[in-house]
Image (cartoon, rainbow, N blue to C red):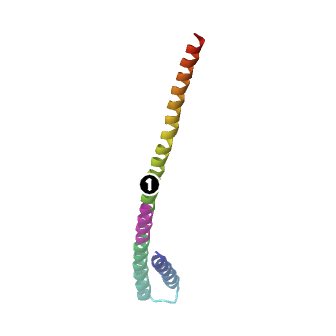
Amino acid sequence: MVNQAQTLKELQASIKAIDDKRSSQDITDAEREVLELTAIALRDAERVAIAAMQKQVTKNMDEKTAALNAQARVIRAKVTQMNKMPKLINTIETVVKTAVKIVVAIAKW
């Protein structure tokens, strides 16, 4: 990615230099035509470099997203596991409260 960024900077600098030369009044029509063709070729190369960088960025984002999704699955599994204990405690609490009510009712007799 660093090489691609450097290549893109060099292409853009070359395009700027060619554009500056093309706008000069001191060149012949033949030279201007060559410079225009060079500018077109450099712009095409610039588009290719940008497309390659975009593909690399997309690939990196996909890799990061996959890792993040895997981590999210682990977290959800742990949360589900942690929620089992409070549910068990609530069930035991309900059973104990019912048993206490029964014992209190028997004691009142």
Q: Nearer the viewer, residue 51 or 24?
A: 51
Against 75, is 56 above or below? below
Q: Position of residue 26 (x, y in %)?
A: 52, 89
Above or below 39: residue 85: above
- Residue 74 in the image: above or below residue 106: below
Q: Which amino acid, by three-letter code, is at mark 1?
A: Asn
Between 37 and 10, the one lying in front of the other is 10
Q: Main secondary structure of the magenta part?
A: helix
Q: Position of residue 6 (x, y in %)?
A: 49, 79
Instruction: Quadrant for residue 66, please give it.
Output: bottom left
Question: What's the residue at 44%, 59% (across, down)?
Answer: 67
Q: Position of residue 78 (x, y in %)?
A: 48, 48
Q: Give the camera-side residue of 107 and 33.
A: 107
Q: Residue at x 41, y 88 (%)?
A: 30
Quadrant into which the C terminus falls: top right
Q: Which residue is mark 1?
A: 69
How many badges with numbers are in the image?
1
Q: Point out the stretch of residues depicted in magenta.
A: 51-63
In the figure, is residue 40 to the left or right of 89?
A: left
Residue 53 in magenta stretch: yes
| Residue 47 point in image, percent of width and height | 42, 72
Please state which of residues 22 and 72 is positioned toward the viewer in this rendering.
72
Secondary structure of the residue carrying numbered label 1: helix
